[in-house]
Image (cartoon, grey):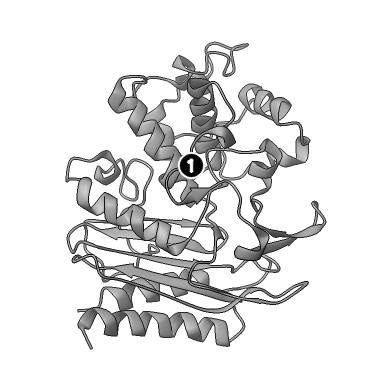
Amino acid sequence: MSKSSARFDAAFSTLAASVESGRIPGGVLGHVDADGNRIIRSLGAAQTVPLSRPMRDDTWFDLASLTKVLFTTERILAHAEAGTIDLDAPLTSVLPDFRHYNPDNWERKVTFRQCLGHQTPFPAVFPLYTYGRDPDLLRTFLLQHEFAAGPAVYSDINFMLLGFALERLAGTWIREIDPGAGFAWSAPAEAAAATEDCYWRHRVLVGEVHDDNCSALQGAGHAGLFGTASALLDFGQAKLATAGPEALIRTPLSGRRTHGWERPYEGWSGGEACSAATIGHTGFTGTGLWLDFERGHAWTLLTNRVHPTRHFDSGIVALRRTVGDCINAR
């Protein structure tokens, strides 16, 4: 058995332990090494209520905040490279109506780069969906809402606004924009991992977006993408081959972040054994993708840890870190 296979087996054993203990219904682990060899393995249940279905290697997952890096960051950086936008220009260069009733407020000075790095004063959480379900009205509401400036934190609002900018540039809804090879904005229920039994949509969500704000907006830049482990490894393999040291997704913006992605820090999701040249991101539904450019490999852990409820200690934080440590063990 190769070292790579032994590491994968150790990582998969930690996932199996989480499933067997009842902390998560099921999951898929995938890895591609520097030579392009890949392993994908699944176990557990894709759904437990109101019916039971097994997890499969090709199960589709609601990728949640992985949308930020797989879709939104990619397209914003492509626009910057093409000269369509200036990353250091304010969002108002594309969204001139953003807080336009008060031209001197701080929101109108927020730049694309600051949003990519979560370096803005927006609040960490904002329940936009509680203001209604009209997507046009909600977009207008968010663009005009007065936020109290706070410390820079990870905030979905950054990527909602970047998504609005992409819609303006494309002249269409975000769900009408090509999500990229292997990805989609929804998935067939019979092929998808279930997420939450939603208290305000009154059904178990299967193949439709879990994120409340994204659902109400009918598509957004911070969530909504669906994909399989194979699609994530394809994406990771492509980035490992093309994103050199000067690539913005590898360029630090802070001690924890690059453009869109996270970089290693004490306690981060990728574990302590990866190289300093690793980037990664996670999704609230229980998903994650990590790319180690020094060692030339990528891994993805996909779970349905919010099924049937998010209000349960799934142990996902420790699981992600342990999987990363196993995959990167010397």
Asked whether residue 290 is in view, the answer is: yes
Residue 304 left/right relative to 3: right
Figure check: 273 above or below 167: below
Residue 85 left/right relative to 275: right
Q: Which residue is mark 1?
A: 179
Badge count: 1
Closest to the observer: 73 or 31? 31
Figure check: 228 above or below 12: above
In percent of the image, x 43 and y 43: which residue is there? 180
In percent of the image, x 30 and y 23: which residue is there? 82
Q: Position of residue 114 (x, y in %)?
A: 40, 32
Residue 132 left/right relative to 65: right
Figure check: 129 above or below 323: above
Quadrant showing the N terminus: bottom left
Q: Position of residue 38 (x, y in %)?
A: 30, 70
Asked whether residue 279 is in view, the answer is: no
Query: Neighbour class for label 1 at 10 Å: few (<14), some, many (≥20)?
Result: many
**Considering the numbered disc 1 on the image, is that residue within a helix, a strand or a loop?**
loop
Quadrant showing the C terminus: bottom left
Q: Position of residue 294 (x, y in %)?
A: 17, 60
In percent of the image, x 64 and y 51: which residue is there? 209
Figure check: 13 above or below 232: below
Q: Position of residue 256 (x, y in %)?
A: 34, 50
Q: Quadrant of residue 133?
A: top right
In percent of the image, x 48 and y 60: which residue is there? 228
Mark 1: amino acid: Pro
